[in-house]
Amino acid sequence: QSTGNGACVNATYVGLEVLRRLGVDASPSVWDAMVMNEEARLLMMDQTPISEWPDTAWSVGVNAKTRDADGIGFHAVVQTKEGILDLSSLQFARPHKNINVPPAMFVSTRDFSGSEIHVEQQGTHYVLYNKRSRTPAALRTVKGFSSDGKLGHTRNSEWIDMILGEME
């Protein structure tokens, strides 16, 4: 469960490595992402221009046009044949704006609708869309997708060892 710029890249690396060591087949997957409260979802459905939204309608997301401070314009997650594991979903949480997201999320493949994943929980809408076809190339160019990357002040390799140690 990580937050901050590039958190999804490091969390995905850690998740993949832990799953690999446990013998679970998984791969990275990168998407555009948007998380919104119910009021924003209704306004989007009505195609109300954002300039006309009240202060209580709120959304947050990342895509190629809205890169973060580290230049990352996508959201990285772990993909298995059973579904998507987002280990950094907490970075989208804005409780003061009624956007409540759990620290990590698993979305079953049976919940996928076409090329979009939409999950609604407690009035918060979590959407992954526009899956990138060149995931490995995108991640290899990003700082942090390695054992030397860091979540907070701890190296990814240390997180992996700590998680596996807790599981013993």
Image (tube, rainbow, N blue to C red):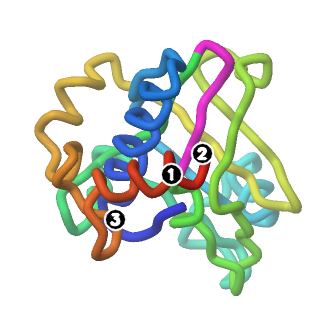
Q: Residues within 10 Å of mark 1 (few under 14, many from 20)?
A: few
Q: How far separated are the C-alphas under marks 3 and 1?
A: 18 Å
Q: Answer yes or no: do the residues labelled 1 and 2 have beta carbons within 8 Å?
A: yes
Q: Which residues are magenta?
A: 81-87
Q: Is residue 58 above or below residue 120?
A: below
Residue 122 image-quadrant placement: bottom right
Quarter of the image with the C terminus in it = top right
Residue 165: mark: 1
Q: What amino acid is labelled 2 in the image?
A: Glu
Residue 74 x, y percent position in the rendering: 35, 44
Residue 154 x, y percent position in the rendering: 30, 69
Q: What amino acid is labelled 1 in the image?
A: Gly
Quarter of the image with the N terminus in it = bottom right
Question: Element type at marker 3?
Answer: strand
Q: Residues within 10 Å of mark 3 (few under 14, many from 20)?
A: many
Q: Residue at x 47, y 64 (%)?
A: 2
Residue position for label 3:
151
Q: Is residue 84 magenta?
A: yes
Question: Element type at marker 1?
Answer: helix
Q: How far separated are the C-alphas under marks 1 and 2?
A: 5 Å
Q: Is residue 27 left or right of residue 104?
A: left
Residue 38 x, y percent position in the rendering: 81, 61
Q: Is residue 94 left or right of residue 132?
A: right
Q: Earlier in the sequence, mark 2 or mark 3?
A: 3
